[in-house]
Amino acid sequence: MSYFIGLDLGTGAAKGVLYDGNKIIAGDSAASSFIRNQNAVEYDPAEHWQSIYGLICSLAEKSPEPVKAISMCAASGNTLITDSNGRPRSNIVSWLDGRTEECPDENIHEIVGWPWVNGFPFAHLLRMRREEAELFEGDFRVCMNNDWINFMLTGNFVLDHSSATPFYLQDQRTFTYYKPYLEMLGLKESQLSKLVPSGTVIGNLKTELAAKNLNSNTLVIAGSFDHPSAARAVNVVNPNEMLLSCGTSWVGFRPAKERLIRQGCLCDPYMIHENGCYGEIISWGKIGLELDAWLEEHYPDKENRYQQFNDDAMSNGAARDKMLEMARTFKAKAFPDIKFNRIVLAGGPSESPAWRKYIAEVWDCNIDMSIHRKYTGAVGAAMLAMKGIK
């Protein structure tokens, strides 16, 4: 039996699993701690690294044998400037950061696969170049938290094509860095991570990071963006299927046979390097935070808030109207031209009978729930770890 660690570097917390190829052996999580100053949302890289490495060690300790491989998916789009040796010069700027920049190119959606979204690395870098020029003096590197974690684990700066999409510097048509954007930011390819397909071996775990069931034979494997990873875990591979992930944002992910650049949709490479589909993503940003505010207003009992919400909805109370309103609004956003045969729910609503009932009613299709629940993305990452050693 072989054992793998899959990590899901989420916005509010990192989740991880120890996986044996068939089931979760153990799961754990580590909360993120943000540094907020007006519209700025950042976090400390040293604290982030200790949190992620601690999570890896915690999971490895529960393994019956040495861990074969580690991979991670991430809610990427968080920016870090380091020196040439990977030592941080800046905080990690979160994709939640509210400082905005004008879109530099009307063709950006076609080139990178995502429409312009303020708060992602291209926007961060435009502002940082203007306001914090000292970060870019001498030898420096530009990365995100996930490829920096890969570096901290292996000594190699490597980034998968899926996670590189919200980096906004990759030409998704050729899977190379787009030179006009690098020139716009004064960057060289040598200052960025090597681009590879998901499931590629990044390197061996550094000897100095050896711990119980972790050693220099443990491989680190390139992962993916978080929603494609979750889709792998629940076998959403056909265009008439959708993964609906409900967290900070509500995100619909569906496979697509061709690279589609449609208004409001994000395009991910997903499985095309395995002769599979692209992925289309539609996001309802930060709606989870708005829902939490609504719940806090209507259900003061914090400990039992979600159960009260479910019970109220099942008895046709105000919660039912709220659920139907959200489900209908998201259906109007999420591929309204597609008739789905199957939707898989992951995240909080998958554990609520009321959510499953009303989402099924609105979409009129079969609703499954991820058996991996909150660890769905992490299981997908563990599957990529398995793929990497084959």
Image (tube, rainbow, N blue to C red):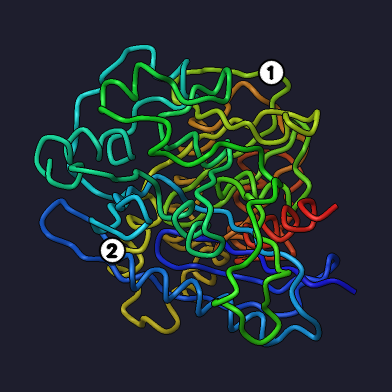
Badge 2 marks a residue whose secondary structure is strand
Say which residue label 1 marks: 258
Q: Earlier in the sequence, mark 2 or mark 1?
A: 2
Which residue is outermost to the top?
107
At 50% from the left and 24% from the top, the residue drawn is 113
Q: Image quarter for residue 274?
A: top right
Do residues under tags 2 and 1 come within 8 Å of each other at their CB atoms? no
Badge 1 marks a residue whose secondary structure is loop
Residue 248 place in picture, x, y as percent: 42, 55
The answer to whether residue 141 is visible is: yes
Tell me the CA gap for discs 2 and 1: 37 Å
Say which residue label 2 marks: 43
The answer to whether residue 376 is visible is: no
Q: Image quarter for residue 267?
A: top right
At 43% from the left and 53% from the top, the residue drawn is 322
Residue 387 place in picture, x, y as percent: 79, 51
